[in-house]
Image: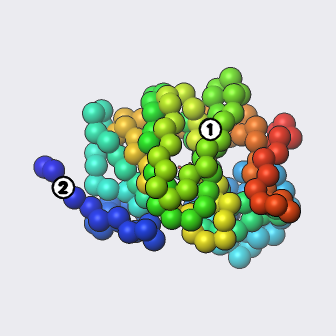
Amino acid sequence: MPFATDLDVGGSMTPHNLVVERRLSHMVDAYADRAAAQELAAADPIVYRAYEAAVPHETDHLVYRTTIVHPGRVGDEFYMTKGHHHHRDSAEFYYGMAGTGVLLMQTRDGEVRHEELPVGRAVYVPPGWAHRTINTGDTDFVFLAVFFGDAGHDYASIEETGFAVRVKEGAMGAVYEQAVTR
Ligand code: M6P
Ligand code: ZN
């Protein structure tokens, strides 16, 4: 049956089906400065949360989630999502709802692109591009993401290579650094 949900600029979704809550201890290896990550993981802060609408994870359906990436850094690297490919290479649609952040994208061949995702901007992630979001501001970064119900989250293949770019805090704002090969 058709249904409606209410999305709040704070990132909450009413009603919602599932909440993904990612704490730093779940992704210590994602950050360049492992020692800083391990130290901060002792207090185990929540890095981000996602709310999902009650859509079946099946072909022809469009699953949507709001995500709230909290502000913070591990060393000088901004808080970010784990990032993933889709098991079935398929597109994703992003829409900025609050705060300041960036969408980092990378193909399996290592081509990298980033797009800022300010409030009111839509970014299209084509099939085959892994995607990670980064909060480059000092308030919650909130966005909506829409993807196919049968896309599936593949974390392993991007974990293996890592993202080739890291987003860090510089003197004049966010800087994009070539990652050291893992
Ligand atoms: C966005 C979408 C979701 C994803 C979430 C958190 O909302 O891309 O599919 O789950 O961000 O990102 P990740 O799954 O990479 O931790
Ligand atoms: Zn995705």
Instruction: Give the residue furthest to the top.
Output: 109
| Residue 98 placement (x, y as % from top left) | 51, 64
Q: In front: 146, or 181?
A: 146
Q: Amino acid at mark 2?
A: Phe
Q: Indicate which disc, 2 or 1, sits on the residue closer to the N terminus.
A: 2
How busy is the neighbourhood of tag 2: few (under 14 within 10 Å), some, or many (20 plus)?
few
For residue 17, what is the image quadrant? bottom left
* Residue assigned mark 2: 3
Disc 2 and disc 1 in contact, CB within 8 angstroms: no
| Residue 71 placement (x, y as % from top left) | 65, 68
How busy is the neighbourhood of tag 1: few (under 14 within 10 Å), some, or many (20 plus)?
many
For residue 108, what is the image quadrant? top right
Is ligand 1 closer than 8 angstroms to the Cβ of mark 2?
Answer: no
Residue in view at x 32 percent, y 56 percent: 53
Residue in view at x 76 percent, y 42 percent: 165
Q: Amino acid at mark 1?
A: Met
Instruction: Give the residue furthest to the bottom.
Output: 43
* Residue assigned mark 1: 105
Which of the numbered marks, if any, corresponds to residue 75? none
Which color scheme is applied?
A: rainbow
| Residue 4 shown left or right of residue 139 in the figure | left
| Residue 8 placement (x, y as % from top left) | 38, 69
Q: In front: 174, or 150?
A: 174
Q: Quadrant of the C terminus?
A: top right
Residue in view at x 63 percent, y 28 percent: 107
Q: In front: 27, or 16?
A: 16
Q: How many numbered discs sit on the rendered protein?
A: 2
